[in-house]
């Protein structure tokens, strides 16, 4: 009976980990896109579509985190820190998506070796 009155526990760390997994997948897809540019434009387009899907899933996690932040009374970290962290994590995937869209928009056919070496970091 009293369970309804108790605040629900939200594990923000699980949401951060889920978002970090999407960042990792997006990074791998961007690397694959850059590696396949000169070999297969169709393959690059598939990787760009995968990046869009990954970014959309990450946006859902971001929105869920912010919604939970607004409905949770006690948080494990300062509210501003949680919001700032998830926003910056989302910015990473937004930038990955921007790169993929720019590659397609300008019909870039090859990536410089420096870009590929940066992707291994």
Image (cartoon, rainbow, N blue to C red):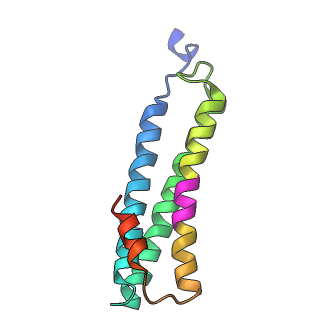
Instruction: Tell me the quarter of the picture where residue 47 sits.
Output: bottom left
Residue 63 within the magenta-colored segment of the rendering: no
Q: Could you tell me if residue 63 is visible in this image?
A: no
Residue 74: x percent and y percent? Answer: 59, 18
* Number of residue marks: 0
Residue 106: x percent and y percent? Answer: 58, 87
Q: Could you tell me if residue 25 is visible in this image?
A: yes
Residue 93 within the magenta-colored segment of the rendering: yes
Most foreground residue, 4 or 96? 96
Most foreground residue, 46 or 110? 110
Q: Is residue 73 above or below residue 44?
A: above
* Residue at 57% over, 39% down: 85
* Residue at 61% over, 31% down: 81
Name the main secondary structure of what is drawn in magenta. helix
Q: Is residue 14 above or below residue 48?
A: above
* Residue at 42% over, 62% down: 26
Q: Is residue 63 above or below residue 39?
A: above
Q: Is residue 29 above or below residue 110?
A: above
Q: Where does the C terminus fall, quadrant-wise?
A: bottom left
Residue 105: x percent and y percent? Answer: 59, 85
Instruction: Tell me the quarter of the picture where residue 82 sits.
Output: top right
In the image, the segment drawn in magenta is 91-96
Most extreme residue toward the top is 2
* Residue at 64% over, 28% down: 79
């Amino acid at each position: 009976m009293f369970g309804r009155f108790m605040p629900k526990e939200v594990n923000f760390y699980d949401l951060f980990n889920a978002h970090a997994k999407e960042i990792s997948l997006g990074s791998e897809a961007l690397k694959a896109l850059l590696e396949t540019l000169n070999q297969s434009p169709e393959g690059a387009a598939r990787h760009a579509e995968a990046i869009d899907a990954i970014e959309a899933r990450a946006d859902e996690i971001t929105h869920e985190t912010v919604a939970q932040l607004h409905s949770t009374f006690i948080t494990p970290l300062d509210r501003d820190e949680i919001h700032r962290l998830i926003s910056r994590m989302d910015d990473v995937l937004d930038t990955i998506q921007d790169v993929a869209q720019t590659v397609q928009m300008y019909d870039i056919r090859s990536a410089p070796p420096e870009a590929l070496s940066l992707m291994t970091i």
